Image: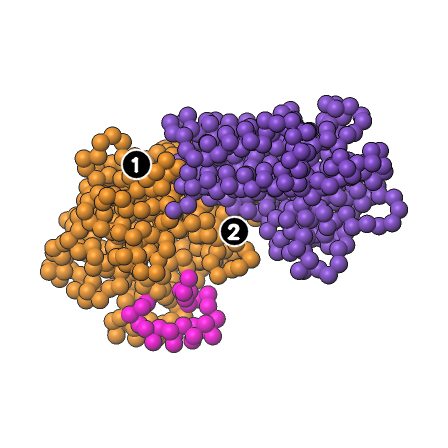
Chain colours: A orange, B purple
Amino acid sequence: MSEGRFFDEMWAQEDAARPPYNSFYSWITHEDPARLRAKQREAEEVFRLTGITFNVYGRKEAEERLIPFDIVPRIISGREWQKLSRGIEQRVIAINAFLHDIYHRQEILKAGRVPVEMIAGNEALLPQMMGVMPPGGVYTHIVGIDLVRTGEDEFFVLEDNARTPSGVSYMLENRETMLSMFPELFAQEKVRNVSNYPLLLQKSLAESAPSGIPGDPTVALLTPGIYNSAYFEHSFLANNMGVELVEGHDLRVVDGRLCMRTTQGYDPIDVLYRRVDDEFLDPLNFKPESTLGVPGLFDVYRSGAVTLANAPGTGIADDKAIYSYMPDIVEFYTGEKAILQNVPTWRCSDPDSLKYVLDNLAELVVKEVHGSGGYGMLVGPAASKKDVEAFRKKLKARPANYIAQPTLALSTVPIFTKSGLAPRHVDLRPFVLMSPEGIRITPGGLTRVAMKKGSLVVNSSQGGGTKDTWVLDD
Amino acid sequence: MLGKTANGLYWMFRYLERAENNARLIETGQRIALTRSGAPTDEWTPVMKTTGTDLSYAQKYDTVTKESAIDWMLRDPENPSSVRSSIEAARQNARMVRTAVTAEVWGAMNGCYIDVKSALARRVNERDLPNVLGLIRQRTALVRGATHGTMLRNDSYDFARIGTFLERADNTARILDTKYYVLLPTSASVGSHLDNIQWETILRSVSGAAGFRKAYGQKVKPSEIVDFLVLDKRMPRSLNFCCQKIRDNLGYLASEYGQRLEAHQMADDMCRRFMSHDVEAIFDYGLHEYIQDVVAALNALGHQIERDYRFFA
């Protein structure tokens, strides 16, 4: 990691705030800090009362926790966003084309752009999906692309989330909270709207319904239940889309269709936005011990009578080992150079790379290939010698399970602390919707922020917080 | 509506009603203890009997003391009917049915849970008890008010109301069943000090003391108490009132769904069999037996509603 300064999105220039922050900065410097502190507490109270919580795994007592919210927005100019959103769209199109290819003709393997063994031996490949065509040809109805910034024009994709990305409810609630606390700010700044996301999600899902359905398609959201870490988000989205929130035991296959048990009998579902992982979807076709899914669901899916969003098997596209091939994947399917850069990645399955990673472990970030949520990763520069050595053993035992990346100099945005504004590292997860009718990208996304000074880990499960994210109409 | 959602609404409001009723029973028990003259008697065992938790209490404690009885009924997690357990269960069900209640109802329920949980985090000492009980009554009333003021009058509301009134009827019936012997004409040495206290207890545990006086005058007759708690259509906690409400809300469901089911017949039968006589007929039948039959009929109706509306797979 290069010592020295990180790119701060508000203060990168010596003498004044960076342009997107100009008017916000002059606002906040004229505000009474005591009032802002009161507002910060008010925001926390709103989140607590609304029950905007998430559940942390592995903790008995703290069943539900609040994600810290910071009142300083993360601001992106319209021009910056235009470039980002073109890159995001390109990437999502490529991911979808890649999935279709992998589960059908596998041209990219034949062309040698991605090695066969990266796919053949990959646990994220779902053999049951071979030759299956999702309704409308869409695999990834909802995608979250995690971006980090290291300089004025340097954005990197940290990872793609093509399975069931979460966090969008925080994006929406953060905006609602800011709107109600600081209406005057929104009167002076032209901030692009995000609050129609649930409507667009509903529309996008309905557009993805199997063809030939009489009348409006019925959409439902499948949750693992109230103990899931993202249950708040599931109920929030179902509520705001006006669709039923179902669990596995509410569902049953009746006459070749997926149906939900209502007070008046079984009603068919056309599109299931499922927030349950592939292997739990159907005990007959996947994990037999799963109680979260529906026996026979995958057979209904294969017959084309229901849409699953996202399609099963999309994990092969956001696998961290496949990630390193994304520039090739984008070029192969779109015929263009990737607009968004990848972070250089060492695949530890490769002996030379492994050697490099082991030699430089204390400088690198090492992640599990299939991991998420910041669990099971090593941030070399922040870890103790003991942790690094413990990790070295794990890495040697199963090299193919890991990838490594340089420790990025993540940009910072100030947060509001007791002693005023202080920079903290951030990332950004924009949310993308895809249907046969097209791609919709919500301006902005969820900004996650490491609340601890110097920390580079922004995951909420590791104590990270969130900020409202503004894209300006400039 | 999902069968699960109907189930969640029904139980959310049953538990909410239960929390409120138990707070009221504790309040009554405490008042009796404070106003009693003469030798100490055990006021708390009958109170716990009313909530159906006297036996599980006896498994945990060797003796009945005021402190441990109040703690048991108020905040013991081992007691599934304690106020704290009930509020937690109500809120858990509310989380399950968040898409079926308004933001105001959810906010009131979540706020109720947060505040009651913190008020009951530690043993409540006698000095703070009135405030804590007041808080519980207030916060549960807020949920009820938000429900009344913001929910559409559709199936969601009907299941919420059915849960409320089944629980309330059950509670009133249990109070009567625990104390039925002091209401029998034979035991009534009218005007005796002990009976007066007992009658007062009964009326207070349904928040009905003042209402009773307004409706029946100052002179308390046990048969009139029975009339008030069982048959009086004006009294919102009487068995008759609750049964009519259950029947009404089932009726709304039948017209919304265009289908009459077994539960509707059972509700009609229950009202006709138990609520269409006068109080003398009830005494002739036997007050205790009558109450037992009503409790059984309420239970059977609850189970039938679960089946008819597919609460479970």
Q: Amino acid at mark 1?
A: Thr
Labelled pair 2, 1 in contact (Cβ < 8 Å): no
Q: CA distance from mark 2 to mark 1?
A: 31 Å
**Does mark 1 fall on the same chain as mark 2?**
yes
Q: Residue under mark 1: which chain is it in?
A: A
Amino acid carrying mark 2 in the image: Glu
Q: Which residue is mark 2?
A: A64
Q: Residue at x 51, y 27 (%)?
A: B248
Q: Is residue B61 visible?
A: yes
In this rendering, would B195 be left or right of A39?
A: right
The structure residue drawn at horizontal position 25% and vertical position 30%, both measured from the top left corner, is A215
> Bounds of the magenta span?
A375-402
Give the crowd class for mark 2: few <14, some 14-19, many >=20 residues within 10 Å: some
Give the residue pinned by disc 1: A218
Magenta span has A208? Answer: no
Q: Is residue A382 magenta?
A: yes
Secondary structure at badge 2 equals loop
Q: Is residue B147 visible?
A: no
Residue at the image position 51 percent from the left and 41 percent from the top: B300
Q: Determine whether, in the image, residue A284 is placed left or right of residue A412.
A: left
Give x and y (percent) for residue A457: 44, 58
